[in-house]
Image (tube, rainbow, N blue to C red):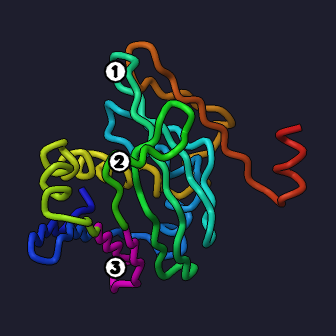
Amino acid sequence: MPITETNIDPDALTLQIVADFTVPVARLWDAYTDPRQIERFWGPPEWPATFTRHDAFVGGLSKYRMTGPDGSSSAGYWQWTAVDPQRSFEVRDGFAGEDGEPKTEMPSMSMVFEFAETALGSRLTTTTSFDSLEQLEELKSMGMVEGTTAAMGQIDAVLEDLATFAHELPTASQLVGDTQVRVSRVVRGSVEQVWQAHT
């Protein structure tokens, strides 16, 4: 489990999670900015995520949907507000409707992801800022801390060396529920080679 600290500050209206990893910052950054990688750990194990859009630039938008074991789903979005490559990024995170559009009547929050080198690899500090104490308490009661902890417990498997992960495994399937299977394909090579593999 990579999480080393979890701090809720009701005065500052923040939830801060610190996690340490034994990989370089660049590898951790890629895991968060590549839609095929982040969807493997953004949702808790029983609520896997699928990203249909994931823009890692200011003004960009990410859209994702988490699907539960009973087939029900919960959609969300990120509005990218700041990006400092391999150092930090900030998004506005909120709930979305079936069409992927933001639900303005539901709470949204600011999330800052800060990446730093450590002696053993890298550290990610995620600080979520809420608009009110009521909002913090509401999302806390919805299981945000437990869900985030469960989701981050999946990161180590994603951070494995891609060469090892892909060795003699051009296509892999993962059972994520009674009626759900995630199919992944890893292609290594130049941009041209990757493009040709998908056409």
Estimate how packed mark 1 is, as few (under 14), some (14 to 19) or many (20 or more) residues with alpha carbons within 10 Å: some
Q: Earlier in the sequence, mark 2 or mark 3?
A: 3
Which of the 4 image quarters holds residue 43? top left
| Amino acid at dot 2 | Gln
Rendering coords of residue 91 (x, y %): 46, 66
Q: Nearer the viewer, mark 2 or mark 3?
A: 2
Q: Which mark is residue 120?
A: 3
The residue indicated by pointer 1 is: 69
Residue 46 vertical position relative to residue 121 in the rendered view, above or below: above
Mark pair 1, 2: CA separation: 17 Å
In the displayed structure image, the side of residue 70 where residue 161 appears, left or right: right
SS under mark 2 = loop
Give x and y (percent) for residue 24.
Answer: 47, 75
* Residue 6 seen in render: yes
For the residues labelled 2 and 3, the Cα–Cα distance comes to 19 Å
Give the side of residue 148 with respect to residue 154, left or right: left
Residue on which disc 2 sits: 154
Magenta range is 111-128
Q: Which numbered disc, 1 or 2, marks the residue closer to the eye? A: 1
Residue at (59, 57) in percent of width and height? 61
Residue drawn at x 9%, y 69% as measured from the top left:
10
- Please tell me which residue lies in front, 174 or 102: 102
Tell me which amino acid carries mark 3.
Leu
Mark 1 lies on a secondary structure that is loop
